[in-house]
Amino acid sequence: MPSSSTTFFTFGYFAIQIGHTFFPTSSGLLLTLATYGVGFVTRPLGGFVIGRYGDRVGRKSAMLWSFGLMGFAITALAVIPSYSQIGVAAPLLLVIIRLLQGFAVGGEVGPATAFLIESAPQNRRGLYVALQMATQYLAVVAAGVVGFALSAWLSAAQLDAWGWRIAFLIGAAIVPVGLYVRRNLPEQPLESTSISGAPAAGQVPLRLIVLSLMMIAAGTITAYTLGYMNTYMQDTLKFSTNIAFGETILEGLSVVSLALIGGSLSDRFGRKPLMLGGLTSLLLLALPGYAAIGMSRNVVLVYAISAVLNGLYGLYVGVAVVAVVESLPRSSRSGVFGILYAIGIAIFGGFTQFIIKWLLDVTGNPLAPGWYLSVALIVGAVAMALLPESAPCANPDRQDS
């Protein structure tokens, strides 16, 4: 099922080129990353409005609205005139469109995840949500392939002037497909029932909310730190754009492969072993990985380390989403998870790449991304250890009533 969130992320992969188009100053990249972060401000509002709509009217209707809004926004972003053409109006329009994108993506996460959880057989929930993650990162692979091809065929000036727009227009071309798929999905019945043993509607414990936000913070900071590798390779390591997009392709393939394995294994052995195993392994390898990248600046080594780190992220992140969502009451699952996810990602993830770039500029330390990532992973590990096991294989009595 095509996801609007991937077109949201594509902005970051072309941050350097977008900066040259809309912020032609020495601080262009920093301003572009700040604009990237602005898109997260409206995600909680989208999570509340569209997520609650999904609880009242239906998951399918909510997904149609969010995907349609994103389709409009991604098309508009591709055709905004540059700063050289309309001056300050260009970055202002860019900010407005990013706010609309944030609202749309914030509204999709809750209904889409709730739909998958409720459609899946109870012993396959982990795999179903992993498939959602896999499709998102297959689109990342596609973005990497498009970026690789464009940077190979076009000069740097052409890529800055109009080449990056092609990637967004290709993304807009999948909107009709996504709308068709969503329109033909079977709507799940709305019931005021929940997984037996989960809290009833309106009774989500504060402890669950806090632990969920800690896990979301860790997951989203990880995603955007690892996703910054494309820009990091160009801006800090001074690799060519073509080589950097090769890393993006590898990033997507690594997450896809391990996400499916992690989701499937979590259905057999429980959520916590996969979550904690993947996250702890990533924590142990993050700093050594960034240290090796900074010292060697070898393309093959960068690719290999990126593949390992992204694979470990894929192993645990989809499982963490399942663990949170299946702990929530069904009647408010779409809205509650949508809001929690949007708040967590807005506060902790939205400005991750801006913070990393700022830390790199201020400290001059190429390990800055690794340190920032490590702190987030420690927070996530604590939350995962405290969250009760939610998998049906470990709780046979927890069934949808």
Image (spheres, rainbow, N blue to C red):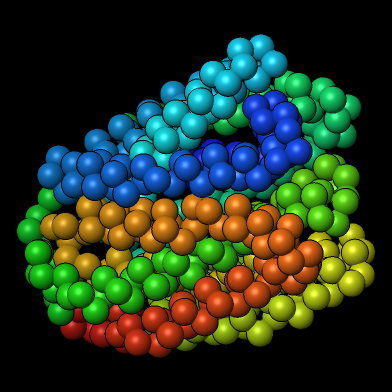
| Horizontal relation, residue 351 to residue 281: left or right | left
Question: Is any part of residue 10 visible from this angle?
Answer: no
- Residue 11 in picture, x, y percent from top left: 60, 39
- Quarter of the image with the N terminus in it: top left
Position of 109 compared to 87: left or right? left
257 displayed left or right of 389:
right
Q: Which residue lies at the image location 61% right of the left edge and 71% below the top edge?
A: 372
Residue 128 is situated, as x and y percent measured from the top left of the image, at: 41, 60
Query: Is 314 situated above or below 167?
Result: below
The answer to which of 45 and 315 lies nearer the viewer is 45
The quadrant the C terminus occupies is: bottom left
Q: Position of residue 203 (x, y in %)?
A: 10, 70
In the picture provided, is 239 more to the left or to the right than 215?
A: right
Q: Please provide percent x and percent y for residue 298.
A: 92, 64
Q: Residue at x 32, y 33 (%)?
A: 64
Residue 103 seen in the figure: yes
Most foreground residue, 158 or 201:
158
The part of the image, by quadrant, that contains residue 200 is bottom left
For this orientation, the residue located farthest to the top is 85
Q: Residue at x 88, y 45 (%)?
A: 240
Among the 4 quarters of the image, the one containing residue 250: bottom right
